[in-house]
Amino acid sequence: MTQSRPDFSDNMKQPNDKESRYCTRCTRALKACLCDYIRRVPHLAPLHILQHPGEVGHPKGTAALLAASLTDVRIHVGEDFSGDEALNALLADPKVQCYLLWPDEDAMTPAQARSHLARRADGGEARAHFILLDGTWRKAYRMLHSSPALLGLPRITLGELAGQYSIRKKPFPGALSTLEAGYHLLSQWEGEPERFAPLMTLFTHLNRQWHDFAQGRRR
Ligand SMILES: [Zn+2]
């Protein structure tokens, strides 16, 4: 690898290392900072990312990029969410309807979730919030099963979208990076994909960086 190429191994460390060489916003190494490509997009439904501790500061994670690209994202770090008071309060809030992004056969599309919300006894007055699990397939499965409240949530699927994310082993066909999942979820929910285009532009820059890095390593 040549010196001019970004050293992604730096991202293995936590962004709050003593002599911080990490961007506090996108959490990437300063020389791989992507903040120039981040545009904050306002959106209707708040997003909650439940992040496995193993994903915090992971060099190939995209949750921090998604959070920096949106106006209403909260990241909750943990493995077992059964005792998470903030999350439990949210799940029990009668004015909120949470949906979990979990593409199984019982999952609804965002369009079906809209009718689901409208069919509620309160006539669709509740505000939709989305919950995303950030971890490997196995870890995400354990996180989901740690909490009966999470397990009982209505689920959302994004359909047969093939992820463009080429840098991580995909847990199952069509699996998306957290950044892509956030893009598809919100653009399908709001029906305005063009408003969320900055997320995919950022994703393209991230993939280009990784591609250049992989090319450099092969030389
Ligand atoms: Zn940055």
Image (cartoon, rainbow, N blue to C red):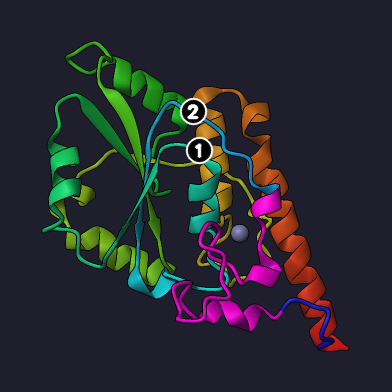
Please tell me the numbered disc located at residue 189: 2
- The quarter of the picture where residue 44 lies is top left
Is 11 or 82 nearer to us in this picture? 11
Count up the numbered dots: 2
What is the x, y in percent for residue 162?
Answer: 64, 51
- Is 26 contained in the magenta span? yes
Q: In the orientation shown, which residue stands out farthest toward the front?
A: 19
Vertically, is 67 above or below 83? above
Which amino acid type corresponds to the residue marked 1 in the rendered image?
A: Leu
Label 1 CB less than 8 angstroms from ligand 1: no
Query: Residue at (57%, 23%) from the top-left corner?
Result: 191
Whether residue 159 is visible here, answered yes or no, is no
Instruction: State left or right for residue 51 relative to residue 194.
Output: left
Vertically, is 89 above or below 19? above
Q: In which quarter of the image is the N terminus?
A: bottom right
Dot 2 lies on which element?
helix
Please tell me the numbered disc located at residue 21: none
Instruction: State left or right for residue 148 relative to residue 120.
Output: left
Query: Label 2: how many residues lie within 10 Å, few (<14), some (14-19) or many (20+)?
Result: many
Residue extent of the magenta highlight: 7-36
Q: In which quarter of the image is ligand 1?
A: bottom right
Which amino acid type corresponds to the residue marked 2 in the rendered image?
A: Trp
Residue that label 1 marks? 185
What is the x, y in percent for residue 116?
Answer: 32, 23
What is the x, y in percent for residue 37?
Answer: 70, 49
Label 2 CB less than 8 angstroms from ligand 1: no
- Is 183 contained in the magenta span? no
Vertically, is 196 above or below 167? above
